[in-house]
Every structure is written in structure tokens, then in C-alpha cells.
Image (cartoon, rainbow, N blue to C red):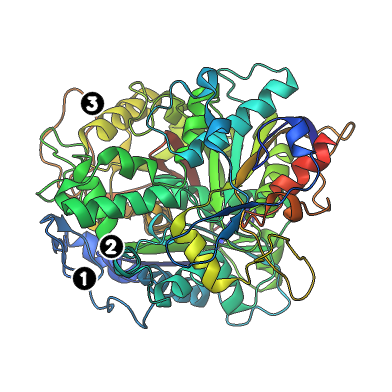
């Protein structure tokens, strides 16, 4: 699949230069569940302040904003106008979805009772809210899709995108992946993964992890010339942290280089 | 058998309407509506729901109920497809859900909030409970695996993904459908959205007042003609069209003219190479909310005219969210195969704003194609067409 445009939101920011920047230590943040600082590659609040893109998303959460910015940038980089496009699809892969919003909704239940919860938080807590915001922001009217998995959701999304293009369901596909960080997820990571206390991701045995967050999108068609989406691209976990939604960021950096 | 068709060689279903295809059909033929207050958990939200009876809340600590429901439907589907042994077969798994993709466990979260520590049974159950990955692991499958989380169209979309895989030659057989459990969190959420009714739901009725949540699972075994013939199977049911389209209109409300739904249905008809007149009946999304039924009913009327036979099976199952598309695909296929569909439970009075009269009782079906529709939070619309090959 030919890459027509790429958008990437990561701990280093939003630009192509940020994506290709040299390795830096992660942030070490205070977490309530342990005394030692916890390393994360987190997207800063300043990265998510583009009013031109996010102006209509006042109620959206960080997860949806990261995804929407990355999707917007992929389309902008292509130079195409996809407004009202019925022949463009959106496929987005995530491991955990907008879990911070899920837990905010549970906060509501605990604090205000089942009958006192916020409908807005509930509707933003579904996994496909991000894709809905992308479709709204960019005016895309083809199939919209979110899939989830803990093994290889982005890779499965790539397979589906290829099938859709091959059978003519779409002419172009906005394909992406993303996940977010949050206190509960950091707690789960601290219990399930060997966290790199020095902030240095180690790929080989024994692996050491630094949780990361971000989103990457590609605008694709089925042409065989130009830059192709390359799933064999080198892992970027050392620079952006470990993303459970798969290899979207790795592929994005490869494409941007 | 049609050489390049994708056949349905197995089906399984579980919902409040019954455990198994035959039991569900018998229950719907008798117009039984198994609706009652929530019994699976304690909740101050007193709304009637459609729970699956006879399945304990959890079969082991940490294991999601959704997975238990899926396994019931899957066992029936695999048995009816003669898939006792999967070794050497190229089988994919595409399943839709909503509840099972989130760590919706208040016990875990409240413990973490209070003590900054929490038992990990629920987390382990969640991480091991991705429906497609868990199914592939359990059955030793190596084909593509995907959990679709497109809210209420997830089950229909999972079947659409399986159709694409099979057409692309990525697998020879696909297990596809959806599963979801009754859970305290969506119950509170739908109550907050003011779309849940305190009465049994009445899809397309003039006095409808909202949906009732339900739970269950519906699974199809889909298979290329070549694979089915190789395994010695003869099936007359096939999945022949799928379409999906976004409204790009609102996060929770459907487009008022149903533009996205109309595009999705037209895309499914195009893929199936059919005209609206070829459709014998429609198993509509029909949630019983004022918005959904008005938009969907008017769109279907515009596309198919007033004579089309329409029902919503949610009057028997409740709204089973990510499972709905899977369950309704099974009922749609069964309706074609048996030659009848049940009455649209709960309907009493025509809503003239919609102008669509659903089936009032058990209705005979003579055609060869049927449509199942799904509309989702986020503005996604999906349509699936199932066909019945002439057995002569």
C-alpha cells in the first residue's frame, strides 16, 4: 500500500523533526502506587492544543485528540481534501482504547452513584469514539472502524486495509494505531512488565519496558509505487516507549525518514 | 453450490430468547419475552433487562462472562459446522464486542482508588479475554484474528471483516459474530443517556420509550465454497453482501435522514449484485429508541417501500450491543432457511412519522435474500445481506 501522507503524535511532539529526533531519556513521573519515579514517554498537553483541528472537540478526551491530530496530519501531508469522501475509510487499532475515560466514568459511579453519572463521559468511553471524532473533524463518510487486541492489533488493521482496497470497498484508507497512558495502566504495567528503572528500553532478553503513548496515521491507497507501508520497519520503542497497539509508530518513523 | 460464494456452514446463538438456534426460534415463535430486573449484579438502576438465564455470572474468578456466552454460541456453531478438529485448516476469527474490550470491573478500580493496590484476577481475565485472541488460542487457530469495537455495529462488522478475509483468500473458514455481557457500567451509561426504558421495549411503535439492555452471543461459521466442498458439506445459506458507512454527523445521534445507513445498505446491495426488490425481509437494528427507529425506519421505507417485511428481534433479546449484529445475523439466516420470521415483539401502534409496519406475528417468507442492519454510537452504519441458494 502506498503511503500518501503520515501523521504522528508522540512524546517528542507532533512534527516530522520530532519523530526523527535523537534518543532522549523518558520523563520520570511521580505515581501514587510506588515511591520510585516511573519512566514514561508521554505526550505533553502542549502537543494537543491545535484549535484549528480540535476546536470542535471540546468534550473529547486526550485519546481522541491524539488520534484526530495524527489523522489530520496524515491527510494534510497528502495534500488531498477528503471532506465528504464516501470512498475513504478509517481503520484504527488500539490495545486499551480510552481507558482513562472508562475509569473517569467509574469514578462517577463511585462518587455519585449509578444514577448520577455523566452521559458525555460514557459516550466518550467507547473505543470507537476517536474514529467518530476523526470522521467528524475531516468529514470522512466511508466505513469507520476500530479494532482492539493485545497481540498485534495494528498488524491486523493493515491486513484489513489491504483487503478493503483489493475488493474496491475504498479508494483510500486512513489507517492508524494509538494508545494512551494513565495511572491505572501504569500500575498494571508496573505489575505485569519489567519496567526499565533507568529509562532505557531493552528489546532483548530480559526485556525492559518504558510505557509510551501516542498515535500514528497513514493515508494509503493501493498503488505499488512510492513509499510503501513497511511492517518490517525497525522498532522505535527505545525512543517512544513501548506501545501495545502494535507497530504504527515504528512504521510512521520509517515513512517519515 | 455457487463457486465463489461465502457459505454459512455453522451457526450458534445464546440470548434471553434461548440457548441455541432451535430453542431461540421456538421461544420467539411463542412470543416469549424473558425480561426482568437485573439479577446478575446489584445496581440501584432499576430497569428491566434481557439476561441469559441458566448461565452463572462467572464460571471462574476473573473470567469475563462475555467469554462464557461466546463459548456457548461457538460450541453450537462449530458442532453444526462439523468442526470438531481444526488442525491443518486455515481459520480466522473476527468477533465484535463492547463490554469485553474495557476493564469494566468496579471491584478492581475501587480497590485501586482506595488502597492504590488491587487484586489482579480481573486484569488477568481482561488481558486473557480478548475474544478473538482467546478463541484462536483455545482452538489452536493461526488465521487472522480481530476484535471489532465499533460499538453497536461490531457484530455485523466482524462478519463483514470475515467476508473480506475469505474473499481475499486470507483464510478458508472464518468464525465471526459478536458477544457481550450484561454489565453495571453500560447499564448506568445508557440510563444516563436517557435512552433506556423502564418498560419492555417496543421497536418501531408509536409509543416506544427506549431500549432494554440484553446480553448474549451469535456466531457464524463462514466458509469458502471450495473449503465446504472439501469437507463434504452442503450449505444453502451464504453471506453475499456487506456495506458500512459513517454519518460524520454526531458522536451519539444518527444522521436525521439516515444518509449513512442508506449508503451502507446500497453498498451491501452492490456487492451482492441485488436490487431492493430482491430483499425478502429486513431484520432491523430497531432498538426502540425514538431517534434510532425514526431514522432507520424512514431510511428503510425510502429504500424498500412500504410492503417490505421488517422486524426487530430486540423485543426478544434486548439490545445486546456488540453481540447484536452476530445474534441478528443468526436469526436472519434462520428466518431465510426456515421460511418464517417472528412478529416484531412489543409493537402495537403504527408511528405515522415512520410509516413502517413491522411484522405483527409469525410471518411466512418466500424470498431468497434478507438484510440485517446495525447503527452504532459514533455514527457507523452497517448492513449485511444473507442469501439462500436454491437447493434444487
Q: Which quarter shows the N terminus of chain A?
A: top right
From mark 2 to mark 1, how far is it between C-alphas?
Answer: 8 Å
The secondary structure type at the circle numbered 1 is: loop
Reading the image, the residue beneath label 1 is B40
Counting residues from the start of the chain, the first of labels 2 and 1 encountered is 1
The secondary structure type at the circle numbered 2 is: loop
Q: Nearer the viewer, mark 1 or mark 3?
A: 1
Crowding near pointer 2: few (<14 within 10 Å), some, many (20+)?
Answer: many
Residue drawn at point x = 27 percent, y = 79 percent: B56
The secondary structure type at the circle numbered 3 is: loop
Labels 3 and 2 within one chain: yes
| Residue B192 image label | none
From mark 3 to mark 2, how far is it between C-alphas?
Answer: 30 Å
Chain bearing tag 2 is B
Residue B246, percent across and down?
49, 31
- The extreme front residue here reads A35
Q: Along the line of sight, which residue is nearer the eye, B211 or A196?
A: A196
In this picture, residue B363 sits left or right of residue B133: left
- The extreme right residue here reads A225
| Residue B182 image label | 2
Residue B203, percent across and down?
21, 42
Q: Along the line of sight, which residue is nearer the eye, A194 or B239?
A: A194
Reading the image, the residue beneath label 3 is B354
Amino acid at each position: 500500500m502506498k503511503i500518501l501522507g503520515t501523521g504522528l503524535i508522540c512524546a517528542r511532539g507532533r512534527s516530522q523533526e520530532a519523530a526523527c529526533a535523537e534518543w532522549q531519556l523518558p520523563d520520570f513521573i511521580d505515581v501514587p502506587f510506588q515511591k520510585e519515579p516511573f519512566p514514561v514517554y508521554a505526550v505533553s498537553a502542549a502537543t494537543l492544543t491545535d484549535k484549528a483541528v480540535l476546536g470542535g472537540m471540546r468534550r473529547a478526551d486526550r485519546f481522541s485528540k491524539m488520534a484526530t491530530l495524527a489523522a489530520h496530519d496524515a491527510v494534510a501531508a497528502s495534500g488531498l481534501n477528503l471532506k465528504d469522501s464516501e470512498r475513504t475509510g478509517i481503520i484504527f487499532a488500539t490495545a486499551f482504547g480510552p481507558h482513562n475515560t472508562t475509569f473517569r466514568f467509574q469514578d462517577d459511579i463511585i462518587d455519585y452513584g449509578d444514577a448520577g453519572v455523566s452521559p458525555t463521559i460514557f459516550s466518550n468511553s467507547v473505543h470507537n469514539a476517536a474514529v467518530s471524532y476523526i470522521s467528524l473533524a475531516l468529514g470522512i463518510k466511508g466505513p469507520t472502524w476500530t479494532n482492539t487486541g493485545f497481540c498485534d492489533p495494528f498488524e491486523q488493521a493493515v491486513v484489513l486495509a489491504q483487503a478493503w482496497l483489493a475488493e474496491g470497498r475504498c479508494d483510500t484508507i486512513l489507517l492508524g494505531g494509538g494508545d494512551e497512558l494513565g495511572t491505572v495502566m501504569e500500575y498494571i504495567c508496573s505489575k505485569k512488565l519489567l519496567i526499565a528503572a533507568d529509562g532505557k528500553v531493552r528489546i532483548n532478553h530480559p526485556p525492559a519496558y518504558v510505557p509510551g503513548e501516542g498515535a500514528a496515521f497513514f493515508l494509503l491507497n493501493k498503488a505499488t509505487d512510492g513509499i510503501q507501508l513497511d511492517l518490517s520497519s525497525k522498532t522505535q520503542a527505545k525512543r517512544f516507549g513501548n506501545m501495545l497497539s502494535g507497530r504504527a509508530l515504528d512504521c510512521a518513523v520509517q515513512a517519515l525518514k | 453450490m455457487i463457486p465463489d460464494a461465502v457459505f454459512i456452514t455453522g451457526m450458534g446463538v445464546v440470548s434471553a430468547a434461548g440457548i441455541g438456534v432451535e430453542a431461540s426460534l421456538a421461544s420467539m415463535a411463542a412470543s416469549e419475552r424473558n425480561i426482568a430486573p437485573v439479577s446478575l449484579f446489584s445496581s440501584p438502576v432499576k430497569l428491566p433487562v434481557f439476561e441469559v438465564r441458566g448461565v452463572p455470572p462467572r464460571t471462574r474468578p476473573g473470567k469475563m462472562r462475555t467469554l462464557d456466552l461466546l463459548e456457548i454460541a461457538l460450541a453450537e456453531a462449530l458442532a453444526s459446522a462439523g468442526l470438531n478438529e481444526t488442525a491443518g485448516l486455515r481459520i480466522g476469527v473476527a468477533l465484535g464486542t463492547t463490554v469485553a474490550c474495557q476493564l469494566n470491573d468496579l471491584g478492581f478500580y475501587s480497590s485501586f482508588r482506595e488502597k492504590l493496590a488491587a487484586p489482579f484476577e480481573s486484569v488477568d481475565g481482561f488481558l486473557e479475554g480478548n475474544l478473538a485472541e482467546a478463541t484462536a488460542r483455545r482452538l489452536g487457530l493461526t488465521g487472522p484474528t480481530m476484535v471489532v469495537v465499533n460499538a453497536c455495529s461490531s457484530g455485523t462488522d466482524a462478519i463483514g471483516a470475515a467476508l473480506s478475509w475469505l474473499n481475499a483468500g486470507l483464510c478458508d473458514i472464518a468464525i465471526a459474530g459478536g458477544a457481550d455481557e450484561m454489565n453495571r457500567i453500560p447499564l448506568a451509561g445508557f440510563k444516563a443517556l436517557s435512552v433506556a426504558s423502564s418498560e419492555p421495549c417496543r421497536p418501531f411503535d408509536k409509543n416506544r420509550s427506549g431500549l432494554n439492555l440484553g446480553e448474549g452471543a451469535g456466531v457464524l461459521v463462514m466458509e469458502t465454497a471450495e473449503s465446504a466442498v472439501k469437507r463434504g458439506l452442503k450449505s444453502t445459506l451464504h453471506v453475499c453482501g456487506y456495506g458500512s458507512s459513517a454519518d460524520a454527523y454526531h458522536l451519539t445521534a444518527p444522521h436525521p435522514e439516515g444518509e449513512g445507513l442508506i449508503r451502507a445498505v446500497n453498498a451491501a446491495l452492490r456487492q451482492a449484485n441485488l436490487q431492493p426488490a430482491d430483499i425478502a425481509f429486513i431484520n432491523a437494528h430497531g432498538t426502540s429508541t425514538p431517534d434510532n427507529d425514526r431514522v432507520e425506519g424512514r431510511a428503510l421505507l425510502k429504500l424498500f417501500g412500504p410492503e417490505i417485511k421488517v422486524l426487530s428481534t430486540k423485543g426478544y433479546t434486548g439490545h445486546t450491543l456488540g453481540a447484536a449484529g452476530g445474534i441478528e445475523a443468526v436469526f436472519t439466516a434462520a428466518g431465510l432457511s426456515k421460511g418464517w420470521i417472528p412478529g416484531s415483539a412489543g409493537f402495537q401502534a403504527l408511528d405515522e412519522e415512520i410509516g413502517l409496519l413491522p411484522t405483527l406475528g409469525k410471518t411466512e417468507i418466500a424470498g431468497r435474500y434478507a438484510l440485517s442492519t446495525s447503527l452504532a454510537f459514533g455514527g457507523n452504519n452497517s448492513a449485511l445481506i444473507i442469501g439462500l441458494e436454491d437447493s434444487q
